[in-house]
Amino acid sequence: MERLGKISVWLLLLLCPCLAGAQEPTKAFDAKETVLGHIGDSYEWHIASFGGHDLHVSLPVIVHSPASGWHCFSSEHLREGGEYEGLRVAAEGEHKGKIVERQADGSDLRPLDLSITKTVMGLFINSLLLLVLVLGTARWYKKRKVDSPAPRGFVGLMEILVSSLVDGLIKPCIGENYRRFVPYLLTVFCFILLNNLMGLIPIFPGGANVTGNIAVALVLAFASFLAINLFGSRAYWKEVFWPDVPAWLKVPVPLIPLIEFVGVLTKPFALMIRLFANMMAGHAVILSLTCVIFVTVEMGMAINSSMTVVSVLFSVFMNCLELLVAFLQAYVFTLLSAVFIGLAQEHKAPEKA
Amino acid sequence: MGLLQPESGLVFWMLLSFVIVFILLAKYGFPVILRAIDSRKEYIDASLEAAREAERKLENIRSDGRKLLDEAEQRQREILREASETREQIIREARRKAESEGQRIIAAAQEQASAERDAILQDARHQVAVLAVAVSEKMLRQKLADETSQTLLAERLLDEVEQTEKQ
């Protein structure tokens, strides 16, 4: 535990949050902008604003443009619409909020953007944390003999989680050769769960909307797609391309095979949309509830304070709900992945009616 | 809307970090944990089995002990019974012997007594014969006198006989 503490302190020092200069005079509060801004990605990690000062973590920008090659600098240079090495964050237009480079003809071109954005940084921190937690648990087991007493505390929790997932979810869903999929499914579950939970913590190392980002959900769904189809049995592929239906449904026009093939693609697509939409919606609802306080400022003291109470109460409720959803979405993603893998593992073709 | 558009940079970093996390966890994380859990499960099962076996053995030993105890009690009872039987038999034997001995002694005594009585009778008969001879002798002496004197003589002689018997 002490080592873990040291590591996290070093991590914080490395990321060294910096205080930036004064902000421009307060403008009218835009709830939609705020909510979308917090849900979406950004080139710096905004922590808080107080007294006209912004507390934020600057993150590295890594960009490759066909015209001027590689750029790598701190996002501090781009704050407040600043321009650096010909690059700036577009204030509006097609690439609003993203880094663009002004071309010779005056148009904006979006370069290849590998910047460590807020979501990427959150992803890194959470991945590192996941590695530390799981490998730490594994190390605990490695150091002990088989007859030592059962683990307590965090390792015990991990053991309960792992064994209940394996025995209660993976084994019944996949069937006999479940063993090769266990590491993947457990990784996916822990990855999503940790990212979801970290997303609920409102301040710095947490708070990044990682799993509520479609790119993250896309990669996870793609990984499940690979796990389903790369290890699919012959019976599964036969079911897809030559199913047991009357021949005219598949010979001149491969109608049913086409439908089946679309089904192969929609399974991971549904996984992606489900995870993304659920997590994003949760964040959006909590942020909107918080915004209620700032929206009602102009409506006078009485309304504002009563709405503040309402907002805090609802936020507490929503956070509890999100805690459930965080677990639930990780569980559902793992469950459905396991079910789809299990369907693709089916050895026998289903009995004819 | 920007939210639905996957950002290529993010996809790249996500792919990278997820693959790294997956490889590390699938190699060094979960298999170790699962193996440890499985081996502990097996160990617990084996321990339970061993405990059950030990309990069964203990039960066997206990029942053996009980059996031994029962047998010992049985033996004790038997020995006691035999001992008492032997004692009775000895007493009976002794009594029988004593009885026969007594009878033998009594018979001997009776025999002796009868022999003595016979001897006495013999003696008495001899005496009677002697007396009868003496009486007849006296009577024959007086025969030549009268009849009355004969009778008187006889009576006197009888008195004499009586007197001698009394003497």
Image: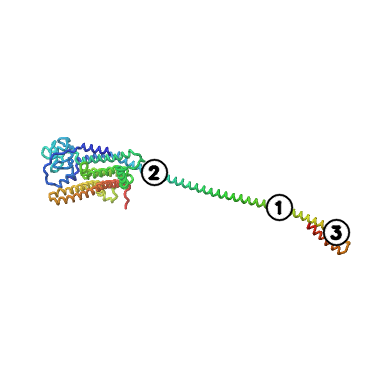
The residue singled out by tag 1 in the image is B109
Task: Residue A55: give x, y in percent of width and height.
Answer: 17, 40
Mark sitting on residue A87:
none
- Same chain under badges 3 and 2? The reply is yes
Q: Amino acid at mark 1?
A: Ala
Q: Quadrant of residue A200?
A: top left
- Same chain under badges 3 and 1? The reply is yes
Q: Earlier in the sequence, mark 3 or mark 1?
A: 1
The residue singled out by tag 2 in the image is B47
Residue at the image point whose x is 33% and y is 38% from the top: A143
Q: Is residue A331 left or right of residue B1?
A: right
Residue A121 visible from this viewpoint: yes
Which residue is nearer to you in this view: A264 or A239? A264
Q: Amino acid at mark 2?
A: Ser
| Number of numbered discs overlaid on the protein picture | 3
Measured Cα–Cα span from mark 2 to mark 1: 92 Å
Residue at the image point whose x is 46% and y is 46% from the top: B62
Q: Earlier in the sequence, mark 2 or mark 1?
A: 2
Which residue is nearer to you in this view: B161 or B114? B161
Count neighbours of disc 2 (C-alpha within 10 A) and say few if under 14, some if 14 to 19, many if 20 or more. few
Q: Amino acid at mark 3?
A: Lys
Count neighbours of disc 1 (C-alpha within 10 A) and say few if under 14, some if 14 to 19, many if 20 or more. few
| Residue positioned most to the top | A69
Measured Cα–Cα span from mark 3 to mark 1: 43 Å
Which residue is nearer to you in this view: A86 or B76? B76
Q: Chain of mark 2?
A: B
Q: Closer to us: mark 3 or mark 2?
A: 3
Measured Cα–Cα span from mark 3 to mark 2: 134 Å
The residue singled out by tag 3 in the image is B138
User: Does the residue at mark 3 contact the one at mark 1 (Cβ under 8 Å)?
Assistant: no
Q: Earlier in the sequence, mark 3 or mark 2?
A: 2
